[in-house]
């Protein structure tokens, strides 16, 4: 697997493998291009559904598709694409930017040599329970959800905890009632 002067693949505490800075990187540097097979939206949907089904059975993360435009996507599993090893973080130091149909990973801030290169995957909250997050940052809510939807997910999670708490207290009340009878 080739890398470039800015990064290399190595072991990650977030998810098995990750991409790491091989030197200090300045903010706004184009670090690496996300490459792969250019596929139609129809093929992209077919593959994503197939991978999702497999991931539910195996627990693997298998989404390597980047949207290019309204007609095309890039399947990053194909070919030599070290950028596919970048992990999600709720506090990413990089972002993926589409420059005229090419996806580039760009530094959002200055990055020190040895730091893991991470970005927000930008997943919609629709299936957030299917995508646990292991980034461990202060901003992490435990699920891979794009930043503008994290407050909604936090609210949903608080609602679930409250309902669980109510159910437990209701069970305790029922037990006390049974004992009094």
Image (spheres, rainbow, N blue to C red):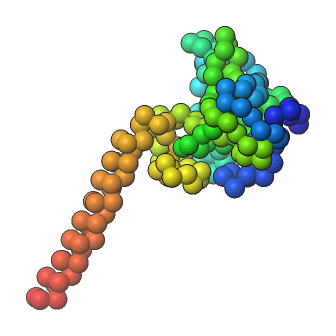
**Vertical order, 122 against 13 (above or below):** above
Query: Is 151 in front, or is 115?
Result: 115
Residue 87 lies left or right of residue 9; in this view the side is left
Q: Position of residue 114 (x, y in %)?
A: 77, 47
Quarter of the rendering occupied by the N terminus:
top right
Outermost residue, right side:
2
Q: Position of residue 54 (x, y in %)?
A: 64, 44
Residue 97 lies left or right of residue 5; in this view the side is left
Outermost residue, bottom side:
180
**Which residue is at a point 16% across and 89% down the rendered structure image?**
179
Tell me how many marks there are.
Answer: 0
Query: Is 110 in front, or is 107?
Result: 110
**Which residue is at a point 81% across and 48% down the rendered structure image?**
10
Residue 31 lies left or right of residue 120; in this view the side is right
**Which residue is at a point 69% across and 21% down the rendered structure image?**
103
Residue 128 lies left or right of residue 62; in this view the side is left
């Amino acid at each position: 697997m080739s890398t470039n002067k800015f990064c290399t693949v190595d072991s990650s505490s977030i998810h098995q493998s990750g991409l790491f800075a091989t030197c200090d990187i300045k903010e706004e540097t184009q670090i690496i291009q996300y490459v792969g097979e250019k596929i139609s939206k129809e093929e992209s949907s077919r593959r994503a559904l197939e991978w999702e089904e497999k991931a539910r059975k195996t627990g693997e993360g298998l989404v390597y598709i980047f949207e290019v435009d309204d007609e095309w996507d890039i399947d990053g599993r194909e070919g030599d694409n070290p950028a596919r090893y970048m992990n999600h973080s709720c506090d990413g130091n990089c972002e993926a930017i589409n420059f005229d149909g090419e996806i580039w990973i760009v530094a959002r801030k200055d990055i020190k040599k040895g730091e893991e290169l991470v970005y927000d995957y930008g997943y919609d909250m629709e299936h957030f329970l299917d995508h646990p997050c292991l980034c461990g940052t202060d901003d992490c809510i435990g699920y891979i959800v794009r930043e503008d939807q994290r407050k909604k997910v936090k609210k949903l999670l608080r609602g679930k905890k409250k309902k669980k708490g109510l159910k437990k207290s209701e069970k305790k009340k029922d037990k006390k009632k049974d004992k009094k009878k």
